[in-house]
Amino acid sequence: DTGVSQDPRHKITKRGQNVTFRCDPISEHNRLYWYRQTLGQGPEFLTYFQNEAQLEKSRLLSDRFSAERPKGSFSTLEIQRTEQGDSAMYLCASSSSHAGTGFYTTFGSGTRLTVV
Amino acid sequence: LAKTTQPISMDSYEGQEVNITCSHNNIATNDYITWYQQFPSQGPRFIIQGYKTKVTNEVASLFIPADRKSSTLSLPRVSLSDTAVYYCLVGADKLIFGTGTRLQVFP
């Protein structure tokens, strides 16, 4: 178990470009989450999947954002027509809904996006 | 989802015990209480989780009173490396973060 992996670690893009991030969860975890974190704030929930089904999307997730988890394993988060306000750390996390005694969510190290 | 309230910041010195209290008045019956630690430019890291009474692991203790409307994370003998933001969360399906408690440990 190598934990939750996110790629890339850093991304600098010009305003208006599209970017895509990838997350590989812990293999036996069936739930996958995306969060966004800006400086000095706690992570904000964006969306989560159980297996390949996207069960919830935050209202923070505008129509420029889309997340997929096509085979219930890795996930991608795409941001179209990036804006400077999209600059943040994007965190992926995974957990198991089958945990017998509660659960805890394991986070990746994040992808830091800078829109210039 | 239950909202949590915790102090914005705390200061301590190396070797002291630090207790961070979190209130969660609207906790639901099936909610667990989970604490995370986050260092700059890293994802949050799980510290401890509990449902009721006391839980202890190798890094911390978690005290939960019978009414479960609050919880206290106890860090014994903190060191400089414990300087971080600590988040208290309650939930079952997804975690909603507040702004956390910024702990600064001084030598």
Image (tube, rainbow, N blue to C red):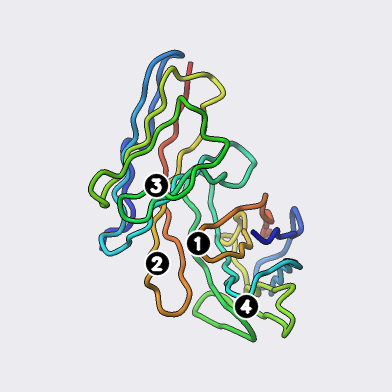
| Residue hosting label 1 | B93
x and y, in percent, of residue A69 in the image: 30, 44
**Amino acid type, label 4:** Leu
The residues bearing labels 1 and 3 have C-alpha atoms spaced at a distance of: 13 Å
Q: Is residue A11 above or below residue A69?
A: above
* Marks 1 and 2 in Cβ contact (< 8 Å): yes
Closer to the camera: disc 4 or disc 3? 3
- Quick one: quadrant of the C terminus of chain B? bottom right
Closer to the camera: disc 2 or disc 3? 3
Q: Are marks 2 and 4 in one subunit?
A: no
**Which sits earlier in the primary sequence, circle 1 or circle 4?**
4
**Amino acid type, label 1:** Asp
Q: Residues within 10 Å of mark 4 (few under 14, many from 20)?
A: many
Q: Are marks 1 and 4 in one subunit?
A: yes
Closer to the camera: disc 1 or disc 4? 1
- Tell me what residue is drawn at x 59 percent, y 54 percent: B96
Q: Which chain contains the residue that carries disc 4?
A: B
Q: Is residue A61 above or below residue B54?
A: above
x and y, in percent, of residue A8 in the image: 32, 35
Instruction: Give residue A99's quadrant in the image.
Output: bottom left
| Residue hosting label 4 | B62
Direction from residue A103 to residue B68 in the image, left or right: right
Direction from residue B20 to residue A98 in the image, left or right: left
**Which sits earlier in the primary sequence, circle 2 or circle 3?**
3
- Tell me what residue is drawn at x 51 percent, y 19 percent: A83
| Residue hosting label 2 | A97
The residues bearing labels 1 and 4 have C-alpha atoms spaced at a distance of: 21 Å
| Residue hosting label 3 | A54
Q: Residues within 10 Å of mark 3 (few under 14, many from 20)?
A: some
Check disc 4 and report its element: helix, strand or loop.
strand
Direction from residue B60 to residue A29 in the image, left or right: left
